[in-house]
Image (tube, coloured by chain):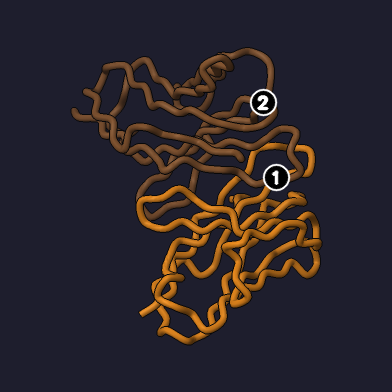
Amino acid sequence: AQSVAQPEDQVNVAEGNPLTVKCTYSVSGNPYLFWYVQYPNRGLQFLLKYITGDNLVKGSYGFEAEFNKSQTSFHLKKPSALVSDSALYFCAVRDAGGATNKLIFGTGTLLAVQP
Amino acid sequence: DTGVSQDPRHKITKRGQNVTFRCDPISEHNRLYWYRQTLGQGPEFLTYFQNEAQLEKSRLLSDRFSAERPKGSFSTLEIQRTEQGDSAMYLCASSLIRGETQYFGPGTRLLVL
């Protein structure tokens, strides 16, 4: 069965410092991996995805993520955090070879960037 | 703006009443998905359409829930005889048939009293 784990409920970082939000996954085949961000009372906004190719994926707003097959991880990173990055971040996975198109989401990580 | 839209944004209803939500996907997106998100959780898949065909339904979608996409454009999600446990954010997403990225709407927040 497919699953996603986000081991940290909350990540605190000072503005200007680098940030990492962790995600590990489990799928039976090759994964399609996604990061979404959610602001209060809003829907999910797409940040970036890994389908195939380079393990380092660049996305919106200066975010990037590194796909690590051996560690089954897809951590979200940003070199310098902004207060406006404070939000709820979700990692999601889809089995590339599966018959379903549904995304399986993690429980989310709240990112708090202090000024 | 040509993003996914949902209506209403908020709905308060009494237990036992029926409610219907509407989703308008991004134009030309053939695939449409419904998810449910409860407080402190990630979205959970409910159902998926390709054009007008409903191709997959989650076990979460009890017989009180029904979804349609009659002409392969907008979709509706109806909940009959609402229960307090139905209180959640209902999210709609759409994607291209050959695309992998699902784009989400702003959601409909349902509160059942």
x then y, percent, for residue A15:
24, 23
Rendered residue at 64%/37% (across/down): A94
Rendered hue of chain A is brown
- Residue A58: percent from the left, percent from the top? 54, 20
Describe the element under mark 1 as helix, strand or loop: loop
The image quadrant that residue A87 belongs to is top left
Of residue A62 and residue B12, the one placed in the foreground of this image is: B12
What residue is shown at x 81% (from left), y 61% (from top)?
Answer: B53
SS category of the residue bearing label 2: loop
Name the amino acid type tagged 1.
Asn
* The C terminus of chain B: image quadrant: bottom left
Tag 1 residue: A101
Label annotation for residue A51: 2
Give me the residue at 58% from left, 58% from top.
B5
Q: Position of residue A34 (x, y in %)?
A: 56, 33
Residue furthest left in the image: A115
Amino acid type, label 2? Ile
